[in-house]
Amino acid sequence: VVGAYKQGLRPAVGYELNPWLLCLSNYRAWKAGYHGKVSFLKEDLWKANLSDCYNVIVFLAPSVNPLLAAKFLAELPDEARVVAGRFPFPSWPPTSTLGHGLEQVWAYDMKEVRRAAQSSAEG
């Protein structure tokens, strides 16, 4: 979230249910000088409405990625970009990738993801 803020993405908001990780995230943001500039909410990502989100960064286990992919397809606008850390969305064509191994990330543009899904469904 702090990295997104540093790149000019506003608002920069994180969702976390684990109270320890929520506390750690807030502490790290405060220590880095971003207290009050970024937000971490104790909210269930599955219940959050993401229809007004244009930049989404996720770091979740591969087992939830199919459910997350469906949520993103249903809620995110075409102009949204999703960046997945460490675990890609296997059925989505990445727009770009960066890094290697445990440090690799994949970026997906929702318009391209939907176009590929539609082509796959038609084929």
Image (cartoon, grey):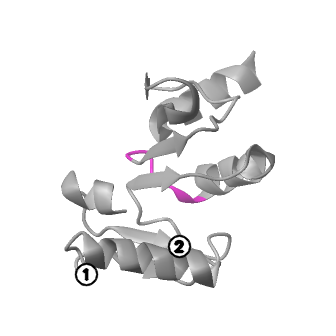
> Which residue is at 57% across, 33% downward?
102
Point out residue 122 in the picture as x, y percentages from the top left corner.
73, 21
Magenta span includes 78 = yes
44 to 90, vertically: above or below: below
Q: Which residue is mark 2?
A: 15
Magenta highlight: main SS: loop
Which segment is the magenta one?
A: 75-79
The residue under the point 30% across, 55% down is 3
Closest to the observer: 28 or 61? 28
**Left or right, 2 with reference to 34:** right
Residue type at tag 2: Tyr
Left or right placement of residue 22 versus residue 46 in this view = left
Residue topped by disc 1: 35
**Mark 1 secondary-structure assignment:** loop
Which corner quadrant of the image does residue 119 belong to?
top right
Q: Secondary structure at mark 2?
A: strand
Q: Is residue 6 left or right of residue 62?
A: left
Discs 2/1, front: 1
Q: Quadrant of the C terminus?
A: top right
Report whether 61 appears left or right of 63.
left
State the image coordinates of residue 47 (x, y, percent, origin top left).
Answer: 66, 76
Q: Position of residue 97 (x, y in %)?
A: 45, 25
Residue at image point 70% right, 29% down: 90
Q: Earlier in the sequence, mark 2 or mark 1?
A: 2
Q: In which image quadrant can residue 87 be found? A: top right
- Compare residues 38 and 26 and report the one nearer the observer: 26
Residue 18 image position (x, y, % from top left): 65, 78
The answer to if 62 sits in the magenta stretch is no
Mark 1, residues whose alpha carbon is within 10 Å: few (<14), some, or many (≥20)?
some
Q: CA distance from mark 2 to mark 1?
A: 16 Å
Dot 1 amino acid type: His
